[in-house]
Amino acid sequence: MKTATTPLDLRDPRTLDEALAILAEDGPRTPIAGCTDVFVNLHFGTTPARRFLNLWALDELRGITADGALRIGALTTYTELIRSDAVNEWLPALVAASREVGGAQIQNRGTLAGNIANGSPAGDSLPVLAAAEAIVVLRSASGERRVPLTELYTGYRATVIRADELIVAVEVPRVEGRQWFRKVGTRAAQAISKVVMAGVRGPAPRIAFGSVAATVVRAPATERVLADGGSIDDAHTVLSAEIRPIDDVRSTAEYRLRVAGNLLRQWWAETS
Ligand SMILES: Cc1cc2nc3c(=O)[nH]c(=O)nc-3n(C[C@H](O)[C@H](O)[C@H](O)COP(=O)(O)OP(=O)(O)OC[C@H]3O[C@@H](n4cnc5c(N)ncnc54)[C@H](O)[C@@H]3O)c2cc1C
């Protein structure tokens, strides 16, 4: 059943300091950015949240810089990622992933931090950020901490982000090697992935998958086979034991395992 919106409590800060003070003194509140995930949950009545914090006016959370590392503000939308020269140069796999998110409306409104904090194992940006060894920058009224994306998730849609913290940015070190991204879904647009993979073909090959576990995952044993000069057949065998996809409404475990293996091989062939 739809959540009635009139009794909902919304605070509308104008600065990041104000937002963090509200979370510290008048929390807990659910942050909203583009609201593309939150609104779906309100529409279907699947969120218990009644108190919200609107981040949209916080220009300090916007902007992309590339100086030593690529730094992407939390409120950066997919459209901004696609149009950014810096992201196209430093992290083209994130541009590829952004092009596959929803349709134009979602790309105009949905944000990178929203995708990260929402924590869906099917989130399209997450395998790219995991393979690129991205750092999530969290800030509260009492300070800042930096958490590798691969350590952010503790389980299905569960993160280490505290109730008084916001994601303020994502930082990505220079990626050594060729980047690659593929999403396999029911159709090209407006489809949640059945399996999504990002890879970096460099001196230390790195691969990450979405939709094959409760969280986005790297595949370190498979990476090690390839780093040690093993064949793609050996890597495929190791991957089959390393990931444990599940059956759900979107696909079966068997199909996902097969697709993940196919993607691994496709990545290796296309980046050789
Ligand atoms: C029609 C449709 C199609 C979609 N297609 C795709 C798709 O193809 N691929 C995909 O990955 N996703 C898809 N999504 C999901 C969604 O659009 C993305 O996850 C998007 O990036 C969410 O960003 P947002 O700014 O709208 O987040 P919001 O809805 O505002 O927030 C999402 C979550 O993040 C939290 N949050 C937001 N910003 C911050 C912050 N700075 N700090 C801490 N917490 C924060 C919120 O509290 C909430 O829990 C789709 C959604 C819809 C409605």
Image (spheres, rainbow, N blue to C red):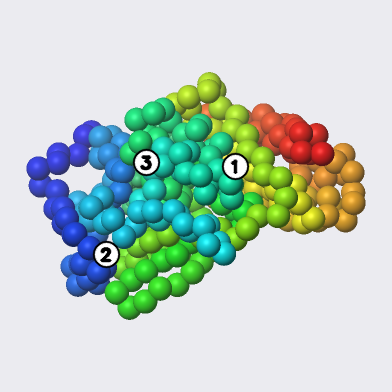
Ligand 1 contact, mark 3 (Cβ < 8 Å): yes
Q: CA distance from mark 2 to mark 1?
A: 29 Å
Ligand 1 contact, mark 1 (Cβ < 8 Å): no
Q: Residue at x 22, y 63 (%)?
A: 15
- On the image, the x and y values in percent for residue 65 come to 46, 57
Amino acid under disc 1: Ala
Which mark is in front, 1 or 3?
1
Q: CA distance from mark 1 to mark 3?
A: 18 Å
Q: Residue at x 59, y 50 (%)?
A: 90
Q: Which mark is residue 93?
A: 1
Ranked by sequence position, the earlier of labels 2 and 1 is: 2
* Residue 228 shown left or right of residue 46 in the figure: right
- On the image, the x and y values in percent for residue 191 come to 48, 27
Quadrant assignment, res 96: top right
**Residue position marked by numbered label 3 in the rendering:** 110
What element does badge 1 sit on? Answer: helix
- Which of 93 and 246 lies nearest the eye of the viewer? 93
Ranked by sequence position, the earlier of labels 1 and 3 is: 1
Q: Residues within 10 Å of mark 3 (few under 14, many from 20)?
A: many
- Which of 25 and 144 lies nearest the eye of the viewer? 144
Ranked by sequence position, the earlier of labels 3 and 2 is: 2
What element does badge 2 sit on? Answer: helix
Q: Is residue 259 above or below residue 21?
A: above
Q: Residues within 10 Å of mark 1 (few under 14, many from 20)?
A: many
Mark 1 and mark 3 residues within 8 Å of each other at the beta carbon: no
Amino acid under disc 2: Leu
- Regarding residue 189, the answer to whether it shows in the image is yes
What element does badge 3 sit on? Answer: loop
Quadrant where the N terminus sits is top left
Q: Residue at x 67, y 40 (%)?
A: 180
**Residue position marked by numbered label 2 in the rendering:** 16
